Amino acid sequence: MNPVIMHVNYGEVSFDSFGSNTIDDICRMAAELGFDGIEFRSAPPKEFKEMPFADFMDQIAKGVKEYGIRMPIFSIGLPNSASADKQTRVEDAEATLKKVQKIHDMFGTTVFNTCGTTILSKDPAVPGTAMESHGSGAATQEQWDCTVDTYQMVAKGLEQMGVKFAFETHMKYLHDTPEVSRKLVDLIDSPNVGINMDFGNTVYFLKHLSVEEAIDLYGDKLFYTHLKSSVAKPGGGRTPTMLSQGEINHRTYLKKLKQIGFEGPIGIEGNRPGDRYWYAKEDLAYFKAVRDAI
């Protein structure tokens, strides 16, 4: 049965920080609710920005041990992966691999969520909600080439460690749509670099593949998944919702994953303010009900 992962943002007070919550609180929350693991960020939140990386990892290790979190997953980005400066990209790759090695040694983590460089339209008149005009829609050939080169450097280290990176399909990155994400991992051409399917991000594009089409496209490059949902707003844009209340049919999503024999982790994400403990409880209950019914 697929490990079920609680995204750390269920335990965060704001979207960018743990706020008054502690790592211990988040680990206890995941265990109480019945998640198998937690997807942490790979750097301390901004309130704790002075905290050394080693101390941050030690706090996570303490909570993981205390509450029996059996699958810690980490999101680790390479913000300079599309830089035109080769040395900057080399340093980014080397620093990333050091973090990955540390995390792998401490927790045995073998699947990491990853994101490259944020790419925005150079036209200031383009709104941030026009997703098609950012990310791959704004990327230059040089940014493509540099991103591929950077991740090929990283992939060599991943292969030696037996660790996989999964590009999250995410707006405003080169890997924003299913088609482009598949193209990117094919160009990198490593068995250890694949895709984290976040269909909750894909639906922010006006035209996109269906859940089934996206899964077929990813094929054996599908390493991880994120589940979240939303509804379209009349004036444009979308409003995040609980899994059971949004427009994404997760019954179809999970049925297709089962059909292809997907055995990787399934992450559930709480990308909205409010009582996130309750949201996590409700989302997990909905997920388990649908999973067990298909």
Image (cartoon, helix red, strand yellow):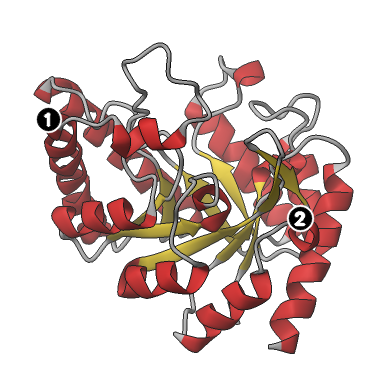
Where on the picture, by quarter, is residue 183?
bottom left
Q: Vertical placement of 79 versus 152: above or below?
A: above
Where on the picture, by quarter, is residue 286?
bottom right
Residue 99 seen in this snapshot: yes
Residue 142: numbered disc: 1
Three-letter residue code for mark 1: Glu
Q: Vertical placement of 60 versus 256: above or below?
A: above
What x and y, as percent, mark residue 100? 37, 45
Q: Are marks 2 and 1 in contact (CB under 8 Å)?
A: no
Answer with left or right where residue 149 lies relative to residue 17. Answer: left
Structural crowding at the residue carrying mark 1, measured as other residues with C-alpha within 10 Å and reported as few (<14), some (14–19) or many (≥20) = few
Residue 178: numbered disc: none
Where does the N terminus fall, quadrant-wise? bottom right
Q: Pointer 2: what residue?
A: 30
Secondary structure beneath dot 2 equals: helix
Where does the C terminus fall, quadrant-wise? bottom right
Answer with left or right where residue 62 lies relative to residue 208. Answer: right
Residue 164 seen in this snapshot: no
Q: Vertical placement of 257 versus 242: above or below?
A: below
Three-letter residue code for mark 2: Ala
Which residue is drawn at the image coordinates 37% and 28% (left, top)? 118
Which residue is drawn at the image coordinates 70% and 80% (left, top)? 291
Structural crowding at the residue carrying mark 2, measured as other residues with C-alpha within 10 Å and reported as few (<14), some (14–19) or many (≥20) = many
Which residue is drawn at the image coordinates 65% and 62% (left, top)? 248
Answer with left or right where residue 20 lies relative to residue 89. Answer: right
